[in-house]
Image (tube, coloured by chain):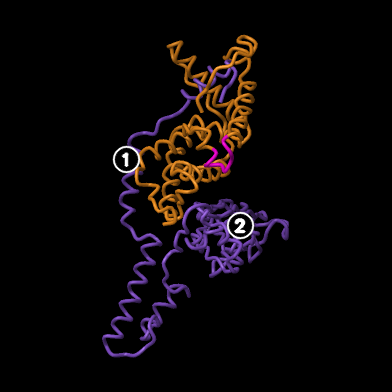
Chain colours: A purple, B orange
Amino acid sequence: MRLPRFHSRLDKQLHAHRAEAPDALVASVASRLGRHSLRFGPQARWVLAGAFVVAMIGASISAGIPGPPGAPASPDATTTSSASTTDAPKPPPPPPPGGDQYKGKCGAAPAKKCKVEVDPDAPKVKEGSSVTLTATVLPDHTICAFTVNWQTADGTGKSAATSSDGDFTPQGGTLTFGPGVDTQMFTVTTNPDARKEPDETFFVNMTVTPGPSSDCAAMDGDDNQITITIQNNH
Amino acid sequence: MIGRRDPLANPEPLIRRVYSYAAYRVGPGPEAEDITSETFEHALRSKHTYDASKGTPVAWVLGIARNCVADAVAARLPTVAEPPELGDDGRLEEEAVERITLAAAIASLDEREQDLIALRYGADLTAKRIGEALGLSTNAVEVALHRALGHLRSRLDGEFLPSPGQSGSEIVAIDL
């Protein structure tokens, strides 16, 4: 790219304006990454869950309990399967060969529900403060881009739209997920007040907006409504 | 893992770039360090979604950093800039004023232009890599960056840089 010369000094100044990361920070973050890489990530959890089911089926067969291949043959195995949020352990989708690997699959896939987890799932916040929530979509639901809308709603705590001394201002936004982006954060703010009152609650409702290239029809699980508790300051 | 490759396999250069990018956006110091840490917390959680065919690890991790910076900026309370600490050394004083003037001029640009400049000069990304991070073509990035520099130049005009008229329309190459 070619720029007029009067930019050249500016270019140098902008380069000089760059701040280098402190070595201690680099070492600290790198160390944490190294430590955490040993933790069980979502993929490892799938593998472990699958291995467990296989082991259970194997144990059933060796114990002489009949059952169709692949089906849990004991009550324990059934419990294990249902405990993993109705999804049977399965491997991640195989990468199609070359090109835009998601092309075709997004439009062709039947609409399904997406699992989005919000953390913390029962946030508490002081009056006048805000809380940042992290929404994470499970790996096999990030194949196609889709958006999740969030919107506050009244509980025992009322918004400024429905009460003259509202506990919070109506808030909302859109979170976009897709390949490479499975985590989004958003912040909900409450209003201060000087009253002595019990803790109050209000909601954040999460809804999926299916797009033309989205294979996600709706949110699955219990995180489509988050209850926020406003703790009284007085 | 979708990407069939660990994007955090060689984290140190990524950490340095993310910090420099964050420092460009929010200023060097604890806030930029927090953003850097937060970025890699998120990167660690979502690294299984990284797809090497969609971009390089640095573009991917800076995409996360951009969200973290945006949240940090949105959560900020209005602050009053502290005046520079001026010492006896005239050059130090001049540099401090230059830095503060430059930072103020960058901060006066719109979010998108600030982001572009931080990606270019903070994260030290080429236009191609910026395009990967933003989902834009290289050409679109170059044009937008050129425009952002023009706006920045106009903000600084009369402060401490020579005016455009001093060097006419002579063109020099800037490696992007």
Q: Quarter of the image for the N terminus of chain A: give it.
A: top right
Per the model, the C-alpha gap separating discs 2 and 1 is 36 Å
Give the mark, 2 or 1, whose residue is nearer the N terminus. 1
The residue most toward the top is B166
Q: Decide whether the magenta segment is chiefly helix, strand or loop.
A: helix
Closer to us: A37 or B83: A37
Q: Nearer the viewer, mark 2 or mark 1?
A: 2
Neighbour class for label 2 at 10 Å: few (<14), some, many (≥20)? Answer: some
Both labels 2 and 1 in a single chain: yes
- When asked about the image quadrant of residue A112, the answer is bottom right
Residue carrying label 1: A27
Q: Describe the element under mark 1 as helix, strand or loop.
A: helix
For mark 2, name the chain.
A
- Give me the residue at 48% from left, 62% from top: A138
Residue A9 in the figure: left or right of residue A217: left
Residue carrying label 2: A147
- Give me the residue at 44% from left, 78% from top: A82
The amino acid type of the residue labelled 2 equals Thr
Q: Is residue B132 magenta?
A: yes
Magenta residues, start to end: B131-138
